[in-house]
Amino acid sequence: MEVLNDVLGYKNRKIYQNDEYFKFSLDGVLLANFVTLKLTTKKIIDIGTGTGIIPLILSLKTKVKIDAIEIQKELCQLLTKTIKYNKLETQINLINDDIKIYAENKNFLNTYDIVISNPPYFSKTKINTVKENAKHENLLTLEDLITASKKLLKNNGSLYLVYDSSKFIEMIRILEKNNLCIKKLQFVYETSEKESSIFLLECTKNGKASTKVLPPFILFEKSGIMTEMYQKISFGSE
């Protein structure tokens, strides 16, 4: 069923979602808040934008044009309505295309200051639905994503990703192969007593090897209440 939802505590932002499709998760919200926007940032692309949660949040932080690319037409149809509802037609440019093909276009090579993605975490499955394609590597593998990102980024441009912590070593291997150096890294935990579920990272194309490991991002106290860090991105975030 299609519904119009609030975007956590963000004022003046609504998002169309459908229960049959993949709905936005905390991962995308965390990633959008992890991104560092500079005065020199002129061009941004969100790969596998899905419901468009990342460009929606970024549009509150910058006036820079944001390309949002999504291969699944059903999600593009929903996002078109979201963009129109929020009156963001002049800032968010929705592209219904395969990033592997898009990244081969010479017009887009080495043109983006920032590439962002909350990609599928799970291995391929034979179930071919909008929801499963958003969660599994049926249409895009991690290696495909990083290879495409390298092509699109300017030299010293930044790649921002959120991914499954259990696959951290795999991520490092692919990044190194593509000359993408991790500049900033943060692991996310549900509570301080549990293992990390996901991590956030910023990489630089052809940058120097120097990594800043940030304090852990913990979502809940032992009592079950939100931590101050979590509250900051959930309420009054505009």
Image (spheres, rainbow, N blue to C red):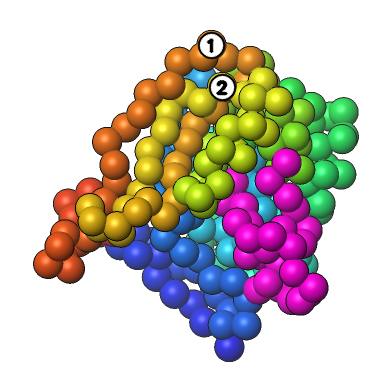
Kindly identify the amino acid type of the residue bearing the numbered disc 1.
Answer: Lys
Q: From this viewpoint, which residue is outermost toward the left?
A: 223
Bin the neighbour count of mark 2 within 10 Å (Cα to Cα): few under 14, some 14-19, many 20 and up.
many
Q: Which residue is disc 2 drawn over?
A: 181
Q: Would you identify the image quadrant in which residue 33 lies?
A: top left
Q: Would you identify the image quadrant in which residue 126 lies?
A: bottom right
Asked if residue 147 shows in the view, the reply is yes
Is 187 or 30 nearer to us in this picture? 187
SS label for mark 1: loop
Queried whether the magenta region covers residue 36, the answer comes back as no
Q: From this viewpoint, which residue is outermost toward the top?
A: 208
Give the magenta-colored segment's residue range: 117-143
Residue drawn where x is 73% and y is 50% of the image: 141
Tell me residue 211's x, y (percent): 43, 21
- Dots 2, 1 in contact, CB < 8 A: yes
Residue drawn where x is 36% and y is 29% of the image: 213
Determine the main secondary structure of the stretch shown in magenta.
loop
Residue drawn where x is 67% and y is 20% of the image: 179
Tell me residue 29's x, y (percent): 42, 54
SS label for mark 2: strand
Q: Would you identify the image quadrant in which residue 187 lies?
A: top left
Is 17 or 11 nearer to us in this picture? 17
From the viewer's perspective, is 14 left or right of 147?
Answer: left
